[in-house]
Amino acid sequence: MANNADNVRAALNGSIYLAPKGSTAPADLTAPWDAAWVDLGYMSDDGVSMEYSTDVEDINAWQSLSPVRRILTSVNMTLGFTAIELKASTITAYFPDSVITEVTEDTVWRLDIPAAPGPAEWAVGLEWIDGDIKNRMVIPRGEITDRGAIPLGRSAAVGLEMTVSAYASSAPEIATWLSNDPAWALAA
């Protein structure tokens, strides 16, 4: 198989969406995200990191120096990003179970951060574009399981670093990835 520079992709633009768990995601690349899906807005210029890993357990035998079998024991998938728009949707995602209330009309808002938040599962959408190539990934059931420090300084935007962990749902998949990339076409 020859190298083909036309198959090299970059994520030049994109969005992260959160919706209540159980929300219906777009079934194709042309349907818009409905009102349940909230766009978290600007992300840091690092973009989004997607990780997928598997763990296996080796079964060894007395008669063999190498494993005679490997059993898949876990699958992990995460999306990491840093939201740099400080708005209700990003702040309440970062601080689960938090509540924003209006203290004085149109001027002061209050964020109450709970001492013992409960689990906060979401449906998570990721969309990225490279020219005419569009990709969408949907995690039907995920949770923000890791949060980075919030930098407060003069030289960079305040960012809310979050990692979403995908969980298995009733379907056998933990995520679905749609693409109109012609390089995905199956060889005849």
Image: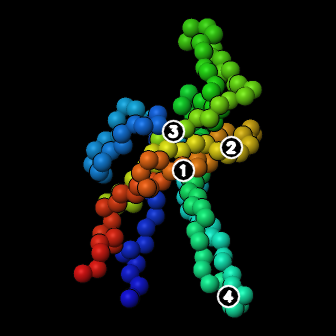
Q: Which residue is mark 3?
A: 122
Cα separation, mark 4 vs mark 3, equals 42 Å
Q: Which mark is residue 147?
A: 2
Judged by depth in the image, the label closer to the viewer, 4 or 1, is 4
Residue reaching furthest top? Answer: 104
Q: Which residue is mark 1?
A: 166
Q: Is residue 14 visible?
A: no
Whichever of callouts 3 and 1 sits on the residue coming sooner in the sequence is: 3
Whichever of callouts 2 and 1 sits on the residue coming sooner in the sequence is: 2
Cα separation, mark 2 vs mark 1, equals 15 Å
Residue placed at 24% from the left, 81% from the top? 188
Whichever of callouts 2 and 4 sits on the residue coming sooner in the sequence is: 4
Judged by depth in the image, the label closer to the viewer, 2 or 3, is 3
Q: Indicate the amino acid at tag 1.
A: Ala
Residue placed at 60% from the left, 30% from the top? 92
SS type, badge 3 = strand
Q: Are marks 4 and 3 in contact (CB under 8 Å)?
A: no
SS type, badge 2 = strand
Q: Which mark is residue 66?
A: 4
| Quadrant showing the N terminus | bottom left
Q: Nearer the viewer, residue 53 or 15?
A: 53
